[in-house]
Image (cartoon, rainbow, N blue to C red):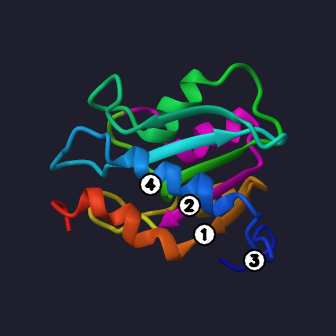
Amino acid sequence: MTGPHATTGPRADDRAWLALACDLARLCPPSRTAFSVGAVIVGPDGREIARGFSREDDPHDHAEEAALAKAPGSLAGATVYSSLEPCGHRASRPRPCAELIVASGARRVVFAWREPELFAAGTGAEILAAAGVEIRELPELADRAREPNAHLL
């Protein structure tokens, strides 16, 4: 990604955390109407704060939403790793994941796969960038993120 909030390169541990998020997506109960996504929140100290996956506790849960619900307090300086670009539009809940991330205080998001326009236009990265959240896309892990969603593609 280019622009004022893009980084010049990934951090040393970005690939490992994002790979974990992709692995979590495999735990999702399959759906014909939603992507299977995994998310991990990591603090500025490099330690895991929380993790989640789509439909973990509720059929409408998104991965980022599930992870954010487990995180204690402010996430100032945290990074959210998501196998799929956080959603920018949502039919099942009032706020999309991009807005929830901004409200959490997390200042960085790393994802593997840009949301295809299957259910909604993928505008999460734009919402995050407009709010000053740093965005990093690692497309080398996109195939791994697509794998648990093969039935939709």
Q: Are the residues at dot 4 and dot 2 in contact (C-beta closer than 8 Å)? A: no
Give SS at disc 2. strand
Mark 2 vs mark 1, CA separation in Å: 5 Å
- 34 up-or-down from 15: above or below: above
Mark with earlier residue (2, 3): 3
- Horizontal side of 141 relative to 153 (left or right) equals right
Residue 151 image offset from top left, x and y in percent: 15, 60
Q: Is residue 141 magenta?
A: no
* Quadrant (top left, top right, bottom left, bottom right) of the C terminus: bottom left
Placement of the N terminus among the 4 image quadrants = bottom right
| Residue 86 visible here | no
Residue hosting label 3: 3
Q: Which residues are magenta?
A: 93-113
What amino acid is at disc 4?
Cys
Residue 54 found in image quarter? top left
Which residue lies under the disc numbered 2? 111
- Mark 3 → mark 1, Cα distance in angstroms: 12 Å
Which numbered mark, 4 or 2, is in the foreground of this view? 4
Q: Do the numbered discs 2 and 1 sit on residues whose CB atoms are within 8 Å?
A: yes
User: Which mark's residue is nearer the viewer, 4 or 1?
Assistant: 4
First in residue order: circle 4 vs circle 2: 4
Q: Amino acid at mark 3?
A: Gly
> Disc 4 versus disc 2: distance between alpha carbons?
9 Å
What residue is shown with label 1? 137
122 or 56, nearer to the observer: 56
Q: Quadrant of residue 138?
A: bottom right
Residue shown at the point (44%, 46%) measured from the top left:
38
For label 4, the residue is 22
